[in-house]
Structure formats: C-alpha cells, structure tokens
C-alpha cells in the first residue's frame, strides 16, 4: 500500500507498507489500522465511509467507481491513498 506524506507519521515514515491476507479494501484498512493505529480514522469518517478529500485506488481503479470499500484486493494488488487536491 502506498502511503501519502501526510499519513506517514502513522507508518513510521514509510511510504509503502505491506498488508497481507485482505480480500477487500475494508479488510485491508482494518488490518492496516491494526498495524498502524489511527490511520483508518484518517481515511474513513465516523460512519465508516471514505472521507470526502481522500481517494483510494486499487491498481488504477478509483474505488468510488469500482466496488467502494468492498473492492477486491487480491494478493499483489497495489493500493494507493491519494489526498484530493483542491485549488482555485
């Protein structure tokens, strides 16, 4: 899983971390949070939904247009957390 700079304080500065055995994105986030407490709350809101300004990709697929948090994450998948950029 690729971790953006803003969340690397949760991963000890690591830009990539491994999460094994997760069948879906939500399982992956739960396992990620077990290893790096607090990171899940930065990606999901209090209702367990993807935060508005966070994008998640499994491979090249934006999960908002795929299966959401139920998007499959087969072994070897690259999952990326991408903070949304706003500007004007």
Image: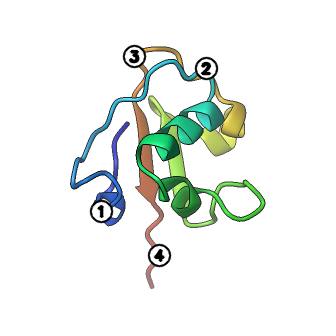
Residue at 22% from the left image edge and 47% from the top image edge: 14
Q: What is the crowding at mark 1: few (fewer than 14 residues within 10 Å), some, or many (at least 20)? A: some
Q: Position of residue 77 (x, y in %)?
A: 43, 22
Question: Of residues 55 and 34, which is closer to you in this image?
Answer: 34
Q: Position of residue 67 (x, y in %)?
A: 71, 32
Q: Earlier in the sequence, mark 2 or mark 1?
A: 1
Give the spatial CA distance, label 2 vs label 1: 26 Å
Quadrant (top left/top right/bottom left/bottom right) for the C terminus:
bottom left
Return the residue found at the far bottom. Answer: 88
In contact (CB < 8 Å): disc 2 and disc 1: no
Residue at 36% from the left image edge and 60% from the top image edge: 7
Q: Earlier in the sequence, mark 3 or mark 4?
A: 3
In front: label 4 or label 1: 1
In contact (CB < 8 Å): disc 4 and disc 2: no
**Residue matched to label 3:** 76
In front: label 2 or label 1: 1
**Residue matched to label 2:** 23
**Residue matched to label 4:** 86
The relative height of residue 26 versus residue 76 in the rendered view (above or below) is below
Q: SS of the residue at dot 3?
A: loop
Q: Is residue 28 left or right of residue 60?
A: right
Q: Is residue 43 left or right of residue 64?
A: left
Give the spatial CA distance, label 4 vs label 1: 22 Å
Residue at 46% from the left image edge and 32% from the top image edge: 60
Return the residue found at the far right. Answer: 47
Q: Earlier in the sequence, mark 4 or mark 2?
A: 2
Give the spatial CA distance, label 1 vs label 3: 24 Å
Q: SS of the residue at dot 4?
A: loop
Q: Earlier in the sequence, mark 1 or mark 3?
A: 1
In front: label 3 or label 4: 3
**Quadrant of the rendered image containing residue 9:** bottom left
Quadrant (top left/top right/bottom left/bottom right) for the N terminus:
top left
């Amino acid at each position: 899983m690729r971790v953006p700079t803003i969340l690397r304080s949760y991963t000890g500065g690591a830009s990539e971390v491994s999460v094994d055995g997760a069948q879906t994105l939500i399982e992956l986030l739960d396992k990620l949070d077990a290893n790096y407490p607090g990171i899940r709350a930065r990606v999901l809101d209090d209702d367990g939904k993807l935060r508005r300004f966070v994008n998640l990709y499994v491979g090249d697929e934006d999960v908002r247009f795929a299966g959401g948090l139920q998007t499959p994450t087969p072994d070897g998948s690259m999952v990326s957390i991408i903070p949304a950029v706003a500007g004007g």
